[in-house]
Amino acid sequence: MPIVYNKNIDQHSVLAIWKIEETEEELLAGLQLKQHERDIISSLNSGKRLLHWLSTRLLLRTMLNTTEYIDCQFDEHGKPYLVNFDYHISLSHSYDYAAVMISKDHPVGVDIELIKHKIKSIKHKFLSDVELAQKQIGDNTEGLYVAWCAKEAIYKWHGKKGLEFKQHIHIKPFKLKKEGSLNAIVELPNGTRELSVNYFKTKDGYMLGYVAGNS
């Protein structure tokens, strides 16, 4: 399971991507698990879902560089957190990759997706007419994935239910590149916030977006 991308996003935050090449047994060998986690594994059966679960935990362990047991749980909103480590975390996975972002100082959000043309059939579900009118989004598959990953990363950064992609997160016009950034206006319960989201396309056809900052 080689790390194919590792970057210090800022003084407090790190993002890493791991290509999943191991078997379930190889991934399990690198983890310390308690019974409640083994119960989760049993419920996932075999296949990609299990590999994704295992690989994000192993990547998290690698990034924290610890031999201690890592208790990764989810709160009532579905946001992952560490019980025994003082880090903000965000997890994502898609097909053959796992992505993890950690920060000592502030909330983070990351999303990785395999680029597929079928996103065009659901674009109206997560983008407003104003956003779709932007030429870099519209019918551009890569632009649509940039917008999706940006909104998903923001949703994870916020970490609470009730934030709607189409209604509350608004992508401002940006120049589409293989690697770049955009700004989004986010309507939060405590007021409107403008966030900067970074994104990049991998050589083998994945899009990744991430955000870090105080909530």
Image (cartoon, rainbow, N blue to C red):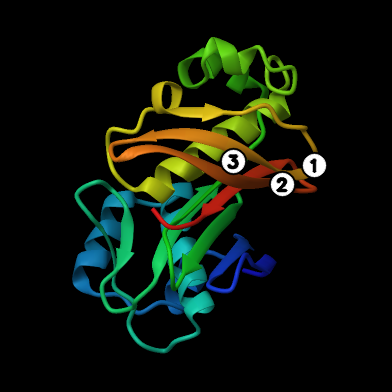
Which residue matches tag 3?
A: 113
Q: Residue drawn 67% across and 22% down?
A: 117
108 or 35, nearer to the observer: 108
Q: Residue drawn 60% across and 45% down?
A: 197
Q: Which mark is residue 82?
A: none
Q: Residue drawn 28% across and 79% down?
A: 84
Q: Residue drawn 48% across and 67% down?
A: 102
Left or right, 22 with reference to 82:
right
Disc 3 to disc 2, C-alpha distance? 11 Å
Asked if 2 appears above or below 124 in the picture, the reply is below
Sequence-wise, the earlier of marks 3 and 2 is 3
Which residue matches tag 2?
A: 200
Left or right, 67 with reference to 84:
right
Residue 151 point in image, percent of width and height: 50, 36
Q: Where on the picture, by quarter, is residue 86? A: bottom left
Identified by mark 1, the residue type is Lys
Which residue matches tag 1?
A: 178
Mark 1 touching mark 2, by CB under 8 A?
yes
Element type at mark 1: loop
Asked if 135 appears above or below 33 in the picture, the reply is above
